[in-house]
Amino acid sequence: MPSFSYIAIDAKNQKISGSITAGDRGEALKQLDRKGLRPTKLTVQDAKKALPKKEKPKRPAVAKKPAVKGEDETGRIKLKKAEVILFTEELSDMLAAGLQLEPALRSMENRQQSGNLKKVSQKIRALVRDGTAFSKALDMISPSFGPLYVNMAAAGEASGALDTILLRQAHYLKTIGDLQNKVILALIYPAFLVVAGLVVSGIFVTTLIPQLSTLLDSVPGATMPAGAVFMLAVTNFVSKWWWVMLIIVLAAALAFKGWKDVEANKPVWDRAKLKIPLIGAVTRDRFFVQFLETMSNLVGNGLTLLRSLDLTRNATQNLHFKEELNGVIEKVGDGRALSSSLKRSGEFPDLLIDMVTVGEQTGQIDVALRKAAERYDKELNNSLQRIMALLMPTVLILISILVGMMVYLLLTAIFQTIDTLG
């Protein structure tokens, strides 16, 4: 059996060293763990006797037994958004305080509250202790972190700024969560208005207008207004053929989903989303903030510009922007400046390019990228506020037009009936 030399921290936070004999690195780490030691360095003393390197653990296969509550069909543990944010904040705080990754995960594993968060910490720590990268362990244990989170963690590992990346990721997740809550709260009143408007319209079309039509038919020479006739015809058509319309809508939705899920069409759809009014501007500003913050963190922690661009591209979810970053990486790899490469892309605004140019000229590109990220973060907040400000009056105007049209048609028919009777 090979021997391992180690340097570790004991229960009194004192650094000690020694050697142990174990079958492999994982077993050596388990022995140190049982002794209450937190290893900071572990090396093989006799490499010739060491066993062959273990293969990297693969994602668990589909479980044969029924999925446990809180787990998906592959056995990975599902977390709530609040749990993901809590995990990220706690881990980033511990790493910023000077703890190594494995001891920090152990502290989270020893928390008093039981639940999925404790299980996730335990399983991730076991994989990290056995040599698996933290970002890969996240993807293997829980689907709730998502590809963006995993790639950001990989970028943090590569740059040595995992605590900073996680802290920013926690801020990003909380911002998105707050935005979703604001949207839900803001939509409650408009949704109530829409439902009320549809109910009133339904009463007009299904009850009042048919009764008025019956009354007008009993009066010689009385005619129903053209608008009421049209609405009555539409109502009769919908009541007769609603199932055909439902089938058509479902077929169209399934066809669109099938088209959208084709790999070749995903960049086209991501490009089309950028042209949607209001939503497109929010998507662009969100990408710029993520791109600039990630680049500033990576470059500021010593990574080369090319490597930083590669990791940032992997963390980008919009496939259209990912293709644009492929072109930028190719140009930077050919020796061109980042600012000129971004300009040739045509997708990056002039203000962003000017700030990158200033950073290149002053030799402080990470500072320039961070300032640009702050500026576009403000632009993103402004875009979101504009959407929220326009949402309420737009819904009110539409509902007012709908109900007003119904009332106008009904009153017109009533007055026409009165004139005919007179």
Image (spheres, rainbow, N blue to C red):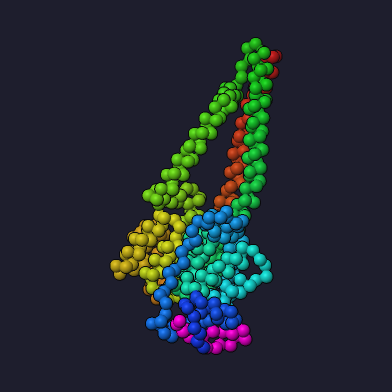
Residue 393 visible? The answer is yes
Q: Residue furthest front?
A: 1
Direction from residue 406 to residue 370 in the image, left or right: left
Quadrant including the C terminus: top right
Q: Name the spot of residue 14 as percent of width and height, x first.
A: 58, 88
Quarter location, residue 210: top right
> Which residue is located at x 66 percent, y 42 percent?
192
Spot occupied by residue 44 in the image (x, y as percentages of width and height): 44, 83
Residue 420, placed above or below residue 146: above
Start-end of magenta stretch: 1-17
Q: Residue at x 50, y 51 (%)?
A: 279
- Among all residues in the image, which is located at the extreme top? 220
Q: Which residue is located at x 49 percent, y 40 percent? A: 253
Q: How many marks?
A: 0
Instruction: Give left or right: position of 59 versus 97.
Output: left
Residue 200 x/y as whole percent: 66, 33
Which residue is farthest left?
334
Quarter of the image for the N terminus: give it: bottom left
Q: Is residue 7 magenta?
A: yes
Above-or-below relation of 394 to 361: above
Which residue does the image show at 54% across and 60% down from the upper left?
Answer: 76
Residue 126's x, y, as percent?
Answer: 54, 71
In front of the other: 135 or 182: 135
Q: Nearer the viewer, residue 135 or 176?
A: 135
Residue 233 counted in the magenta span: no
